[in-house]
Image: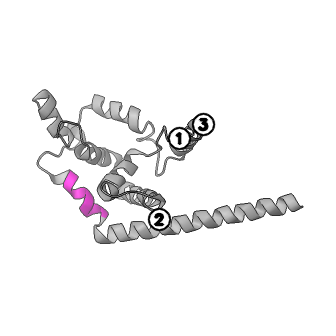
């Protein structure tokens, strides 16, 4: 009986901590999107002169990025618990951070709102809320185009169109 009571107490404590962390992440999310709504933040990566639509991105590029960054991107909805748990297990085994569990949509959220700030647990949880909002607003194809248009590809080249011109002298 004592073991059951201790177990239930531990579950309640963990649930309380998770609930509090979720609440703080929600507040961080709300402040971020009140300052700059998600649609406004993403617009710059859809309307710029060098922005590409998903239909303009080579299928091999899409497949390569998805295979490396987010294998289940086009089939999963929302937060990728499988990738998260895999990353936690790998990091625990290695006793250090060796693998991330962020999805393409989470990386967009980070780049839109938290790229230039140090991120703690509140910001990581807020990214999940932003990711959810992004996936409510945009199709997976539109999000992939935003991702390709915002990424840095080295040598001062940001966005896939600039990278294509800079490395291959082609559109």
Mark pair 3, 1: CA separation? 8 Å
**SS assignment at label 2:** helix
Q: Which mark is residue 111?
A: none
Q: Of 16 and 130, which appears nearest the observer?
A: 16
Q: Which residue is rendered at x = 23% and y = 39% of the image?
A: 55
Within the magenta stretch, is there residue 60?
A: no
44 drawn magenta: yes
Q: In the displayed structure, would residue 140 be above or below residue 62? A: below
Q: Which x, y percent locates residue 109?
A: 35, 54
- Give the residue number, with chain letter if any, for mark 1: 96
Sooner in the amino-acid sequence: mark 1 or mark 2: 2
Observer-nearest residue: 26 or 75? 26
Which quadrant of the figure has residue 12? bottom right
Residue 86 as seen in the image, left or right of residue 151: right
Q: Is residue 25 above or below residue 53?
A: below
Give the residue drawn at x 17%, y 40%. Answer: 157
């Amino acid at each position: 009986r004592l073991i059951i009571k201790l177990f239930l107490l531990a579950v309640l404590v963990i649930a309380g901590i998770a609930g509090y962390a979720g609440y703080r992440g929600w507040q961080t999310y709300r402040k971020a999107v009140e300052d700059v709504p998600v649609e406004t933040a993403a617009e710059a990566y859809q309307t710029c002169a060098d922005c590409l639509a998903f239909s303009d991105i080579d299928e091999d590029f899409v497949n390569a990025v998805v295979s490396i960054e987010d294998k289940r991107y086009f089939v999963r909805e929302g937060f990728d618990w499988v990738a998260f748990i895999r990353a936690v297990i790998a990091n625990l085994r290695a006793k250090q951070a060796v693998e991330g569990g962020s999805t393409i949509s989470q990386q967009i959220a980070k780049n839109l709102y938290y790229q230039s700030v140090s991120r703690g647990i509140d910001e990581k949880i807020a990214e999940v809320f932003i990711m959810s909002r992004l996936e409510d607003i945009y199709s997976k194809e539109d999000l992939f185009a935003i991702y390709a248009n915002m990424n840095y590809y080295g040598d001062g080249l940001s966005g896939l169109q600039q990278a294509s011109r800079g490395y291959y002298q082609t559109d």
